[in-house]
Image: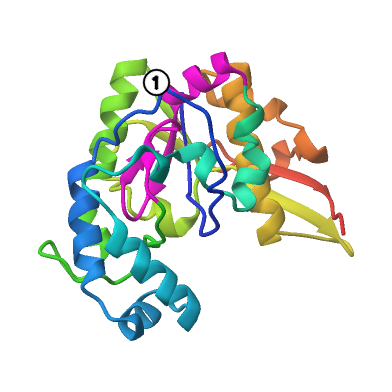
Amino acid sequence: MLVCISPAKKLDWSAVERTDLTLPDFSKEALSLAKTARGLSITELQNLMKISLNLAQLNQDRFKNYAETPDVGALRPAALAFAGDTYQGLEATTLSDDDMRWAQDHLRILSGLYGVLRPLDQIQAYRLEMGSRLNTQRGKSLYEYWGSNIAKALNDQAVATGSTTLINCASQEYFGAVDLKILKVDTVTPQFLEFKDGKAKIVSFFAKKARGAMARFVMQNRLSRADQIMDFDSGGYEYQPDQSTYEKPVFLRTYRV
């Protein structure tokens, strides 16, 4: 089984002592994108990513400092570098070495800059959402830039691990970069709902955190079949068979403030 998650805008660049970092499969493509992005003005970066002036300045500096052969201090393992809601649920820093080794083969982070990342792939600080309409030699958006490459990479890893199912814990923005016409594994997308005032609804913050917790659940339990995720109960969620389909299993809990 494979699991995919989204990256995060927020980064954690605190010191991480690891000597087992790996090189991203699409390093050359990431460098090409960084070179394209570094040519944009601060105003263009603001418009591209809908961010503030200060954030645009920060990310212009990041793209300018992006190096083909960076210093070790500029690198972090992907699963430990992102610090958004999903990563609060994943809690990668507390995974055992065995869990991390298994995750290296079974967990994939979809990325606007890097395409597909393994947990221990070395990354440089960046922000580039998959939905960005960055003009490149391959088209007018990152979806066009990546084309079928992400789906092919997932297919290759599915073959390498004997996986027949992909648990999609990524956002629609990022999973939209996966060419489903090319993807050869079954896709299962869990839905996480909060019950409040007699209604069940998706609350973004909680759903993102639950996606990370689901990825952690798969990693720690070495799951291999889609039906095994029905046992997921982290944070009080319960599987709802009457509301679920194979492709979209539903998990519900009482809303928490």
Q: Which residue appears farthest toward the bottom when viewing the image?
A: 43
Q: Which residues are magenta?
A: 96-124
Frontmost residue, 209 versus 242: 209
Q: Quadrant of residue 93?
A: top right
| Point 49% across, 18% down: residue | 102
Frontmost residue, 207 versus 136: 136
The quarter in which the C terminus is drawn is bottom right
> In the rendering, at what x and y percent does residue 126 appear?
39, 57
In this rendering, position of residue 198 left or right of residue 185:
right
The residue indicated by pointer 1 is 163
In this rendering, position of residue 32 left or right of residue 244:
left
> In the rendering, at what x and y percent does residue 245 appear?
58, 40
For the question of whether residue 131 can be seen, the reply is no
| Point 30% across, 59% down: residue | 65
| Point 49% across, 24% down: residue | 103
For the question of whether residue 20 can be seen, the reply is yes
> In the rendering, at what x and y percent does residue 215 appear?
58, 34
Q: Which residue appears farthest toward the left when viewing the image?
A: 137
The local crowd at label 1, few if under 14, some if 14 to 19, many if 20 or more residues have their Cα within 10 Å, is: some
* Colour scheme shown: rainbow
- Regarding mark 1 in the picture, which secondary structure is present there? loop
Relative height, residue 36 to residue 238 (above, below): below
Frontmost residue, 80 versus 198: 80
In this rendering, position of residue 61 left or right of residue 33:
right
Relative height, residue 230 to residue 220 (above, below): below
Q: Amino acid at mark 1?
A: Ser
| Point 66% across, 60% down: residue | 204
Q: Is residue 118 magenta?
A: yes
Relative height, residue 20 to residue 125 (above, below): above
Q: Is residue 7 magenta?
A: no
> In the rendering, at what x and y percent does residue 85 appear?
64, 52
